[in-house]
Image (cartoon, coloured by chain):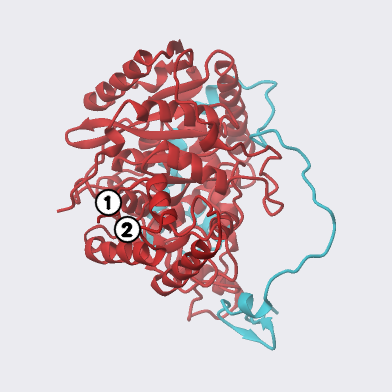
Amino acid sequence: MLSKEEIIKISHLARIELSDAEVEKFQKDISAVLDYVEELKQVGTDGLDIVSSVTGLENVSRADVAVEGGNKDEIMHNAPETKDGYYKVKAIL
Amino acid sequence: MNYEFLELTELRKLLDEKKVSSVELTKYFLNRIKELDPKLNSFITLAEEEALQAAREADEYIASEGENFPLTGIPYASKDLFVTKGIRSTAASKILDNYIPPYDATAIAKIKAQKAVLIGKTNLDQFAHGSSGETSAYGATKNPWDTERMPGGSSSGSASAVSAGLVPWATATETGGSIRQPASLTGVSGWKPTYGRVSRYGVMAMGSSLDSIGAMAYSVRDLAMIAEVMSGQDLKDSTTGPVEVPAYSKLINADLKGIKVGIPKQYFIDDMESGVKSAVMDAIKELEKQGATLVDVDLPNTKYGSLVYAIVCPSEVSSNLARYDGIRYGHVTGDAKDLLEVYQKSRAEGFGDEAKRRIMTGTYVLSAGYYDAYYKKAQRVRRLIINEFEEVFKQVDVLVCPSTPNVAAKLGHAAQDPLFGYIADQLNIPGSLAGLPALSVPCGFSEDLPVGLQIIGPQWGEQKIFNVGAGYQEVTEWHKQHPSIK
């Protein structure tokens, strides 16, 4: 089973604060998923490439031209906090 | 006159002949929702005013134009995973409870351009994470055939609403079974497109290499009509293929003579319910009776599908849900002293259990030291699955099998098992990993609950599955059975 420390490390990487009860629950749940997928390690995959595009499309690009990007006010309207037309965040430094 | 359960072609005729107006239809379905949905909880948001406005515009268009579009004036519902301009779009998560999108998803814009009437947004598993509808932050949806049972998921509300006759059709999405499984469990017809057939732009992302945008309706012919509207290349989704959209509905050839139908033995698993198996076997016999040639085929890597999915899906979920930071939109905590805490607490408060579980699992398997062992390995096994399907489709036109191994379970069943979804969707996931189009069509009942027949085609092979599905529905009546809600 995954350790408590491992779960806390992952929760930090995922930027989700977990309660002690959740840490314990995810120790069990994630371990269950890892056990479930264990069998894959036995499947021979030498020489097979990794699927990066399921339909085989490659390097799709469009012309580099400016287009209307949408209404700024409508977009900013959903932000919890704005100031002078900018997103407002807590001080970092 | 009753308008529920009419197919789109029937509604089209009534509207074109001015026997009913779009406003009348819209009011009819709104009333039906108000009367019956308290028992089902299939809607999160009703867009009553917007719908009536759209219906008035559709009626003006019908009065003034010579030719209407296939969907003009016809009410529909959208899974609440699609963003809809000016109409709250929640993904059934509290983290987006107050989100009013400034734009329409491409699929919604295409439907809107036909002057169809969006009546509301349907319930789903939160962020489409689930196979029962029960992970919604807005309460579980019920199955109209038995309101003590789940409708399946994640497109739970769309399935329940169409099944109960609350709307003539609804949009839906699938990552690994989320259209086929609920369509099967509620007795409606569901279309999961080829990956990249319909633009994902504006549909909240779950597993970006798997997400497919489709629909549910009462017949395969209806789905073919809807597919023509929703499909096509979109510059805003670079995974939409440069593949022309055929006039699917006009090109339908329901004659099954000479069609080669593959029966994959791995899809008839040991613990399948006997009633499901016998309904599906009867359907296969019917296809044969209509002139199809049955071919036994072997897909030995099927068993790895759910395992690959259990790695690939949470990995992509963890990347996609990183965008919910409490800054640009969505829930923000009221209790943070610095930026890091804004992220950590907003996400802790906003995401439900299942979203957290997938984010955590995905973050783990993508983290340093585990990426090669899990993610890369899974994506190589996925290649095996794709290659295997390609080989099989050299021998057959379509594959048929059950849509799900079981009929609808009781509510509460899924929460007891963290692997419920991988088991419920095991007959859908391999096709999703390979980007294949598929249908679920009603094919009978087991213990008075609907059973679905799955029809899978090769990539971009929508026409083939529509042909076989329409051929089957021409000689059967299962898709015309509807629940009476108690």
The label shown at residue B164 is: 1
Residue B281, above or below B37: above
Which part of the image, by quadrant, shows the N terminus of chain B?
bottom left
In the structure shown, which secondary structural element does the residue marked by tag 1 occupy? loop
Residue B11 can be seen in this image:
yes
Which residue is at a point 32% across and 16% down the rendered structure image?
A: B285
Mark 2–mark 1 Cα distance, whole angstroms, equals 10 Å
Residue B334, above or below A65: below
Which chain did the image draw in red? B
Q: Colour of chain A?
A: cyan
Q: What amino acid is found at the position of numbered circle 1 in the picture?
A: Ala
Q: What amino acid is found at the position of numbered circle 2 in the picture?
A: Ser
Identify the subunit bearing mark 1: B
Q: From the viewer's perspective, tell me whether residue A13 is left or right of residue B448.
A: right
- The mark nearer the N terminus, 2 or 1, is 2
Identify the subunit bearing mark 2: B
Residue A9 can be seen in this image:
no
Residue B460, above or below B267: below
Count of marks placed on residues: 2
The label shown at residue B323 is: none
Q: From the viewer's perspective, tell me whether residue B49 is left or right of residue B211.
A: left
For label 1, the crowd category at 10 Å Cα-Cα, with few meaning under 14, some 14 to 19 and many 20 or more, is many
Coordinates of residue B450 in the picture (x, y in percent) = 26, 36
Coordinates of residue B80 in the picture (x, y in percent) = 45, 60
Q: Is there CB contact under 8 Å for labels 2 and 1? A: yes
Q: From the viewer's perspective, tell me whether residue B4 is left or right of residue A65.
A: left
Residue under label 2, please give it: B42
Q: Depth check: give the residue in front, B109 or B407.
A: B109
